[in-house]
Amino acid sequence: MRANDKVLIENINDYFTHKGLSPNLIDDIKVKLKKDFTKSEAEDKDYIEYRRKSPAEIILTIQRNLFSLQLNPILFFILNFILISYLYDKQYVPFQAASGLTIFYCLVILPISILIYYRINKKNYLYSNKFEMILGLCIAAMSIILVVIHALNVNFGIVMVTMYAHQFVFVVGIIFSIGGIYLRKLEFTGIGLLLCQKTIDAIITDSNIAQVASIVIWILLLIVIIYYTIRISARN
């Protein structure tokens, strides 16, 4: 390892130790940085020369990305929770129908928000995530527009869909719920439970049983939200 690269690692270690980051997170940053050194070593350059950035710029980039990583799951959950609650009209499910806003959310907003979520999570702290931030702001702006449109009783029409469409959304909700618990991504568990609650009538035809199941799902969702909030507070 080059002498200047060692100094950079020491500077990063000292800076984030002073900032109070956990040793595990600092070690993770250093591991990813050392892996990235192979790119500069392949060109026989110091890392800061390879990146064309000063040590301070590299440290600030890492700091911004860490902030984005902390906010990423929270914003992802809040955005999708509000949109599912507000745009997914549960009343249309028994009639094998869905509003245009619901379809637009399921086919456009939800997939793009998941893509942004994973792109930010995959970042290794070292490089800017401006593209993801800009795309995220566009999605947020689009979401606000959709909420305003819905508030004005504009829903882009009622579209007839088969019951299988709502059942598919229910299955996606189950996958999100179980996958979120397994991967310790409770933001997905919360979204999955809400999708299940919205589409439970597509699975259970008896309205009384469906209502009980819906209440049970809401209770589970409340437990997840409380636990998730406590975990985030403890982490911070």
Image: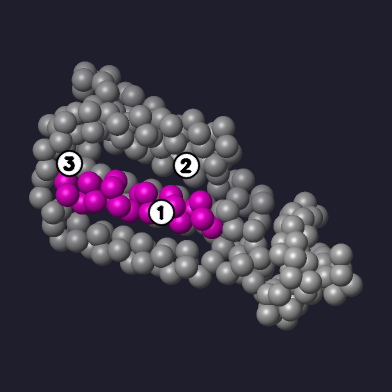
Q: CA distance from mark 2 to mark 1?
A: 12 Å
Q: Is residue 144 left or right of residue 157?
A: right
Where disc 1 sits, the SS reads: helix
Provide residue 94's location: percent of width, then percent of height. Answer: 16, 30
Residue flagged by tag 2: what amino acid is it?
Phe
Q: Quadrant of residue 142?
A: bottom left
Q: Please identify the quadrant where the C terminus is shown.
A: bottom right
Q: Please identify the quadrant where the N terminus is shown.
A: bottom right
According to the picture, the residue beneath numbered tag 3 turns out to be 98
Residue flagged by tag 1: what amino acid is it?
Ser
Where disc 2 sits, the SS reads: helix
According to the picture, the residue beneath numbered tag 1 turns out to be 113
**Residue lying at the far front of the rendered structure:** 43
- Judged by its main secondary structure, the magenta piece is helix
Q: CA distance from mark 3 to mark 1?
A: 21 Å
Tell me if residue 225 can be seen.
no
Residue flagged by tag 3: what amino acid is it?
Ala
Residue 108 is one of the magenta-drawn residues = yes
Q: CA distance from mark 2 to mark 3?
A: 23 Å
| Depth check, front residue: 211 or 169 | 169
Q: Which residues are magenta?
A: 99-120
Q: Earlier in the sequence, mark 3 or mark 1?
A: 3
| Depth check, front residue: 166 or 32 | 32
Q: How is the image coloured?
A: one colour
Residue at horizontal 64 percent and vertical 72 percent from the top = 61
Q: Earlier in the sequence, mark 2 or mark 1?
A: 1
According to the picture, the residue beneath numbered tag 2 turns out to be 188
Q: Is residue 83 left or right of residue 174?
A: left
Residue at horizontal 59 percent and vertical 58 percent from the top = 123
Residue at horizontal 58 percent and vertical 38 percent from the top = 184
Provide residue 227's location: percent of width, then percent of height. Answer: 56, 40
